[in-house]
Image (cartoon, rainbow, N blue to C red):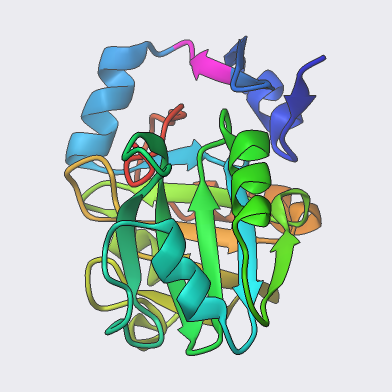
Amino acid sequence: MEKITPLYNCHVQQKGKIVPFAGYLLPVQYETGVINEHMAVRELAGLFDVSHMGEVILEGKDALLNVQRLVTNDCSHMYDGQVKYSPMCNENGGVVDDLLVYRIHSEKYLIVINAANRLKDVNWIKQHLIGEVNFQDISDEVAQVALQGPKSKTILMKLIDENMLPAKYYSFVESVEINHITCLISKTGYTGEDGFEIYCKPEDAIKLWRKLQCHSMATKWMIRFHHLKRG
């Protein structure tokens, strides 16, 4: 049975065409059509529900050691607030999944994984942990929306100061308050346009979604179904 994201009712109310995807019920498009949705992201901004993505935490003295064992890219020189894309491979060099590594600090890393591979990835990671590290699958405790397009920064700056936004591509800022909602904001856009990903608690997702819509200069909204770093 498919799951739903915290924003499911918003999609239904906005007449999204709901289809099964990666174990979730998500809108494949809205009434305006995919061309208008595409152009909104190219010219203004589009809002995406990516709450189906998976998120896990590795924390402890050997957190980095385990990250280095799991992914192919070198994460040893990452700074706090940096994000890195990498494949996660098996012993034969085959790809288990592609993912994003967020360095929160030297002993704590957030890893964002594909929704369709969540259970497989979680099991793979858990089976290959060594040393002093704590693993947490926090996927059900996190909602994620993405604001993508050339007007995305302008829209967010109506809600928060510019210095609260990540300045560099593939970086993030933790514990940002958007209208009393505590968020993590990253800049890892997948559309070829400027954009941000905003993580929050599931119970805050609808409030955040509606607030972004209210302040948006976009008139078309769309959903994305895969991740770039994440694909």
Residue at point 51%, 70% (across, down): 66
- Given residues 111 and 16, the one toward you in this image is 111
Location of residue 182 (image quadrant): bottom right
Q: Where is residue 30 in the image (x, y as percent from the top left)?
A: 49, 15
Residue at point 56%, 18% (across, down): 27
Taking the image as shown, residue 192 lies to the left or right of residue 117, namely left
Residue at point 37%, 77% (across, down): 165
Whether residue 84 is situated above or below residue 47 in the rendered picture: below
Stretch of the chain drawn in magenta: 27-31
Q: Position of residue 43 (x, y in %)?
A: 18, 39
**Residue 30 drawn in magenta:** yes
The outermost residue toward the front is 92
Characterize the magenta stretch by its predominant secondary structure. Answer: strand
Residue at point 77%, 26% (across, down): 3
Q: Is residue 35 visible?
A: yes
Q: Is residue 52 visible?
A: no
Location of residue 1 (image quadrant): top right
Whether residue 182 is situated above or below residue 2 in the rendered picture: below
Whether residue 110 is situated above or below residue 116 in the rendered picture: below
Q: In which quadrant will I find the C terminus?
A: top left
Q: Where is residue 230 in the image (x, y as percent from the top left)?
A: 38, 43
- Given residues 122 and 190, the one toward you in this image is 122
Taking the image as shown, residue 70 lies to the left or right of residue 123, namely left
Q: Position of residue 47 (x, y in %)?
A: 45, 41
- Given residues 197 and 40, the one toward you in this image is 197
**Residue 33 drawn in magenta:** no
